[in-house]
Image: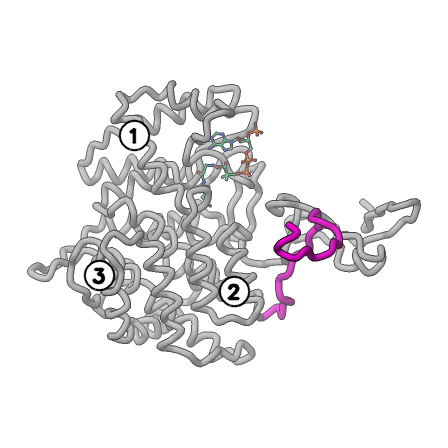
Amino acid sequence: MSDKATLEINGQKHEFPLITGTENEVAIDIKALRSVTGGVTTIDPGYKNTGSCVSAITFLDGEKGILRYRGYSIEELAEKADFLEVAYLLIFGELPTQEQLDKFHSDIKKHSVVDDDVKKILDAFPKSAHPMGVLSSLTSALTAFNPSSVNVDSEEEMYNAIVRILGKFPILVAWTMRKKMGLPLDYGSSSLGYVENILQMMFKRPDENYEQNPILVNALDKLLILHADHEQNCSTSTVRIVGSSHAGLFASLSAGISALWGPLHGGANQAVIEMLEAIKEDGGDTKKYMGKAKDKEDPFRLMGFGHRVYKNFDPRARIIKKAADDVLGDLGVEDPILDIAKGLEKEALEDDYFVKRKLYPNVDFYSGIIYRSMNIPVEMFTVMFALGRLPGWIAQWREMRLNKEPIGRPRQVYTGETLRSFKGINER
Ligand code: CMC
């Protein structure tokens, strides 16, 4: 294959280099486009064809249903690794040795505290506030208590910023849920593993010891791993673009949380459960909802179906579907909406509309069913996604800063009024 692409505009030919990734993905490098063509730009709403960066963190092949973090398959990581190891892998590029992992965990624990005034900020929110709005605000508020900016050229400062947020974020997550449930705010225990501690911080009641249930620990560990990174999705691109202005890590993460909130992105896990509940309440008529999803006059979409990149299957969905069966079985929970979900999936996979458009269940189709069996309130589901995605956002922010990427600033094609004269208010 040639290593150049030729573009002809008004009879003039311009050559652009091709760049090839380690998995043979090819991209046309158009960095020089505007300068060599005298200002011609490209237009690609939703960036369906546009690579915003080169990245060595996550590889995914949507046609083949492949997802790998730093070269390791998601299937192998979900089976053999724990979340903290995966976080280390994503952020620093290699699996940690036991010694590195112990140090990483112990450094995170040192930062597992937030300023007590954060409680006052949380207190000011009404109980009805959506947890994603609360989490995004609290994450941004951390900037006020840790105002010094990170010198990204210092490995030590970068490392400290990373362990700091990995220590504080689970507290914000747990407090967000405890506020919703009217439980007192408290800290976990430094003798626990990272995921065990999260569960204790979320669920411990003031009058009881919290008994760890290994089924829940394993389930949460796996869910967090499956959500830990997904290359340049909406929230990750947001974190990178906000960080590209050299805004701090907390501010960049807070913006990422807001991006994740929407129902087309991380908010889908909440939307799926609400949809399955509505179908159940409506008598379980899945055909009616399939019809609505296919009707172009109806804004209803089958939540948890379709993906911008996966056009064959979402490997995370396969793992989660099996985990949902296992976890509900192990916990002895029978949830009728699991059957509705399986019924919908079967119908969609045999339906021409879904087959033609390559719409398959995505990671969020079954995750909510597991969260629900763990007694996590439905409005917290997207917060749990954010907790899992945290190491991915950090890894992408770090890579962007270390690569010294320029500030993100897309172009546009202007379609508004051309120059016109101002009319005084009496002439309009
Ligand atoms: N139900 C019904 N029709 C759909 C759906 C759906 N869930 N998803 C896509 N379509 C149709 C869409 O109407 C369009 O049809 P046509 O070609 O006739 O106009 C076609 O499929 C292509 O859809 P699109 O919206 O152009 O595709 P996209 O790549 O822009 O959107 C998506 C991807 C995930 C936003 C979309 O599939 C969707 O809205 N799904 C439901 C929300 C959801 O589950 N989101 C979670 C994504 S995975 C978790 C994450 O990483 O965020």
Q: Choose between 19 and 377: the one closer to the eye.
A: 377
Mark 1 neighbour class, 10 Å CA radius: few under 14, some 14 to 19, many 20 or more = some
Tag shown at residue 27 = none
Residue marked by disc 3: 201
Residue marked by disc 1: 278
Element at label 3: helix
Tell me the distance, in whole angstroms, between the alpha carbons under discs 1 and 3.
31 Å
Residue marked by disc 2: 397
Residue 82 appears in the picture as rendered: no
Is residue 264 part of the magenta span, yes or no? no
Residue 297: give x, y in percent of width and height.
Answer: 49, 25
Element at label 1: helix
Residue 187 higher or lower than 312, as above or below:
below
Q: Choose between 415 and 87: the one closer to the eye.
A: 415
Q: Choose between 320 and 360: the one closer to the eye.
A: 360
Q: Amino acid at mark 1?
A: Ala
At x 48% / y 38%, what residue is drawn?
314
Magenta segment:
402-428
Residue furthest to the front: 426
Tell me the distance, in whole angstroms, between the alpha carbons under discs 3 and 2.
27 Å
Mark 2–mark 1 CB contact (< 8 Å): no
Tell me which label, 2 or 1, sits earlier in the chain.
1
Mark 3 neighbour class, 10 Å CA radius: few under 14, some 14 to 19, many 20 or more = many
Tell me which label, 1 or 3, sits earlier in the chain.
3
So how many labels did they put on this image?
A: 3
Q: Amino acid at mark 3?
A: Met
Select label 1 or label 3 by which is in front: 1
Q: Choose between 307 and 271: the one closer to the eye.
A: 271
Tell me which label, 3 or 2, sits earlier in the chain.
3
Residue 174 higher or lower than 368, as above or below:
below
